[in-house]
Amino acid sequence: MDNDLLKTASPIEFALSDVPDDLFRRASFDEDEAEALSPHVSYWSDVWRRFFENKSAVVFLTVFIIILLGCYIIPLVSPLPITGIIDDSINAKMSSSHWLGADKFGHDFFTKMWKGGQISFMVGFVSAILQTIIGVIIGAVSAYAGGRVDSVIMSIVNVLIAIPYLVIVLAIRVVAGAGTATIIFALVITGWLNVARLTRGQILQLKTEEYVTAAKSMGVGARTILARHLIPNTLGVILVAFTLAIPQAMFSEAFLSFIGLGTNAVSWGSLIRAGMDVRFKHPQQLIAPSILLALTMLCVQLIGDTLRDALDPKLRR
Amino acid sequence: MLKFTFKRMFSAAATVFVLITLTFFLLKMIPNGLFADPNISKEMRARLYELYGLDKPVWQQYLIYMKNLLRLDLGDSIAYPGRKITTMILDPATGNGLPMSMKLGIASLLFSVPTGIALGTVAGLNRGRFLDKLMIGISLVGVSVPSFVFATMSVTVFGNILGWLPTTGFSTPREMALPIFCLSLGTIATISRLMRTSLVELESADFIKTAKAKGLRRSKIVFRHQIRNALLPIVTVLGPITASLLTGTFVVEAIFNIKGLGGYYVESISNRDYGLVMGLTVIFGTFLVVCNLVVDIVYGLIDPRIRLKQ
Amino acid sequence: MNLKRLVVLLMAALTLIGSASAASASLEPAVIRIALEQDIETIDPQQNTAAYTCAVTEGVTEPLLREHGTEILPGLAESYETSDYQTWIFNIRKDAQWSDGTPITARDIEWSYKEIFTRPEAAKVYILFSDVSGYKAITDAQSANATEDELRAVVEENFGVTALDDYTLEVKLASPRPYVINTFASTAWAPIKKDLYEQYGNAYGSAADKTGYNGAYVVSEWRYNESVALEPNPNYWNAANIKIDRVELLIVKDQEPRVNMFREGKVDSARASSEYLEMMADDAFVLEGTNWNYVLVNSYRRNAEGALVNEAMSTLLANRDFVNAINAAINRTTLFGSIITDPSYLPTNYVIPSIINSNNVARDTVGKLRGDTYADLVPITRDEAKAKEYLAKALETLGYASVDQLPKITIVCASTTDPQTVGEYMKNALEQTLGLKIDVEPVEFNVRDSRIISGDYDLLYMGWGVSNNDADGYLSVWSDDLFCTGWPQSDPETYGKYADLITFIGTTADMDARANAILEAEQILLSQGPIITLATHGDAILLSKRFDGFGIKGTNSLYDYNYASPKN
């Protein structure tokens, strides 16, 4: 495009024809300038680029993907069983076959530890997704509707936030029984509140923007305005909230499992709890899942941070 | 301002009321399993229900509870016959319960907030340099390692293996060191990150640019403008942080045998000691609401736009 | 010369310092500190008999007799007589008094024992008076919803405790029962102080000043949820022989800090799991348990109205071959040897030998009949072939083509570490060996208990100990169907036979015939009963060696410090 422009905009073309070729220098492009001129770099590809510019984020994203894949692949390929009772290897010490020893049922700890990550990830992602969806919808509706609807919804949110979290967890646990679904449900019930507040704040700001007023005056319905204009424009903030909700949920799952109110399935929290009991004999069974949990947290936090920086050009250096 | 404060206080009181009501009925929904000792006959169990007024319809129990609450009477414990809930939560003879949790929480707050602000400032002013990267690393570890893992590890390492510090109690400074540190790590990380971010954000703010353009000394810009304004967002998170410190001491209290409220939290719910659960809910809920209220008011004082909008 | 003098002087000085410090050491008060794993709920002896509560009541109350180790010593009664083991005469000591100097007479004791039945809050400890004649009439009256006054009249008329005069108390049992002697030493048999009780009602025992003390110690300070401090009772009849100046019971709920406090010398005794016992073997004390751990098998799962709900499951669990298959699929040696953290034992009998042994009279008649084990009924290792054989037989009888058609079985267990481990073990082992489908449902303790008393479970893991220290206690719970196992409904014939045996055991005066009946009942229970017995549960306790006579005893209270003295 730039070349075309040069060509057509050259009125003295033939007057220069007798100038020797070697006097011509090919115009060089300054890459940065080219970019500045380019009109078609979308916001999202810009975010993408900014994200991958951050080397440590890329490293941690890689680590995160490795851990994620490890959790789903290692239990599949490991030859060592993690169900049943393996009499020969009960409480086995670290060895070449059992890299981190075996637990009280004779299950290989290394395999079990990765398997435990599945629950942590599942709880983290599923509850983060659900609470984000619920929070966004309620927050958006509340902000857009305004007035009485808004104040009712917001006072409900304020009350729910103040209810001791463990009371809710226990109540759901007793009604629905212990299980992963219970934990997710409890986390969603307590987690959507923050997302709703955040979304509401954003939409309140956007509501007064001119393009919304324009859409309204052209007779566009409230649902379309919300879905087409308002929510997409708050996506950045929502995405950040989402990345923060994941570690939050994983933390809560680990904490609940640690105090014995978690899932019955193997998870990092329950492994850490069990590791505490054997920390003098098998310290690795406390340290290894702790490190894995902390490392995952670290990755998610860092990815979230970088994403936030990438989404918010104001913070761009 | 007075109208704003009054309005906020009214909604805070309403919140506490709804919270109490909701928790009360939520608890009654949970199967209670009280007096389920197989040695106790069905008839005696019925008499025990009668004794504790649990045979009445739930709404009646609720009205009785609310009536007593107005007189600041939180009722008697079921699990500990003859013991007042108020004494359990706020024991003047021992200073256990709420005062102990407050002591732990405030000590942690006094340690973590200045430390977090200092670390965040150092990092924010040295952006991109070694100190910044070190601080980011430390704070990331702080937010990534769960407090229960950190507490267990530090008890094992500093207490059991090295034997440097006592691992139980909370009366001497030596005893206080480990629990405060374990409890503070997360807060330090949160605050320092926030501080750093807002310092960085302010760097490009117009009034800082103006100050720079006026040729003000860097130290003056930093202390007069940047840090002072960067503290604003910290105020907003102080409310939730204070509440979570005072209420979230659960694991630390258990591991270090500190007699705060944390120990009662799960125990009372699994004992179905309704009075105690309700008492704790009232305390925690009120606390949370008051923290948010104070932050709102303080913020309204600092930033006039907030109260004008209302 | 000078040097020599200097040395002599130095030596003299050192000796002086040494003796001075020795003197100050002997002046230091002797304090026993015990870490308890739960807060003391009440020190009213009629409201609670849990082991950690008894750590206090053992010191501050005095029952008719005392138990020290396995000995029975005089207590509130300086002596007792019985000719037929049915009527017991206790001679109450004339100097018996409360800590404030008020005398205690046999009439006060009678009042106290009778009062208990009008107190609903004392329902938990009724069972400790179940050997006394008239107990049945009283509980029947309670079941008939008698008013308090009616109840009082029934107690007055029927209950077999009478003060013959101020210093003679007669206790009449339902039948000759030589084995109940330990019960007279349980804290529930300590009197309560009438004036304070009338003033405070069920708050009696809720604070230091709301309790009467007639034991070796009084509560000098009670800091809720933190500690209870005991100091010697100057008005105790045996005050001269109390050698400990102060007993402190510290509440430390979590194991980590408890063990740490023991290591740091802050307490002299603390409960711990076996792992610590191995590490600290020098200080460890393991008490062989008197609590059995079972899996209850519910063959009549019912709803709130008491009607059968899950017929397929109930039929399955009523099938003895199926239960035997589960029984054979469990490897008790690995489960309780290497998996469970608390010490556990695999006794050779269902009625725990230590109970028989600690009971001098019963040992002669029952103990000698033992010797054979129930290896086939309570196998100590897994027998996969046999388990599969049983399962095949069960499937055939019930008409299932394969194990996959069986409904999913739920195991209810408490949500603490060990019970949950057992639940998970059962799931893993049964799925692996038999191919069953198992769900584990860990619930809180009281929820588990309410599931038991409503019969709302398929399989349920629990522990149960006897409160009256007799073989009968292990057996009669099944004839009463306290745990709602549905045995009477699913197999009325065997159950009837069993119930008859229990009635006989409870009433006969012939100790030999009784012992034989115990063995027979035991055999029926293990081969036909609604349980899968697993192991007995022990207590692992760290105990410092600073004191003589400070120890652990098996029944009634756990800690035994009344007869302790500092070591020299």
Image: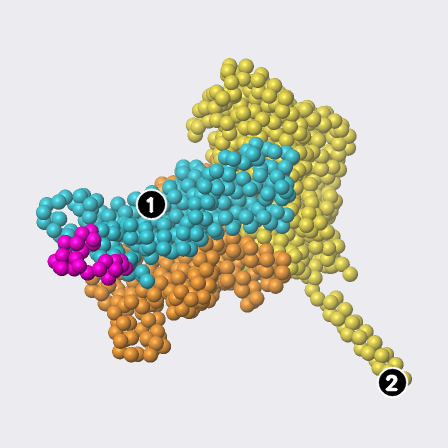
Chain colours: A cyan, B orange, C yellow
Taking the view exactly as shown, the residue that stands out farthest to the left is A218
Residue at 29%, 50% (x, y): give it.
A45
Cα separation, mark 1 vs mark 2, equals 89 Å
Specify whether residue A29 is painted magenta. yes
Q: Assign a secondary structure to mark 2.
A: helix
Mark 1 or 2: in front is 1
Report the front residue among A221 and C383: A221
**Amino acid on which disc 1 is placed:** Gln
Q: Can you say whether A255 is above or below C136 in the image?
A: below
Residue on which disc 2 sits: C2
Q: Position of residue C273 (x, y in %)?
A: 63, 46
Q: Position of residue A20 (x, y in %)?
A: 22, 60
- Report the disc number at residue B26: none
Residue on which disc 1 sits: A131
Give the magenta-colored segment's residue range: A1-30
Q: Can you say whether A42 is above or below A83 in the image?
A: below
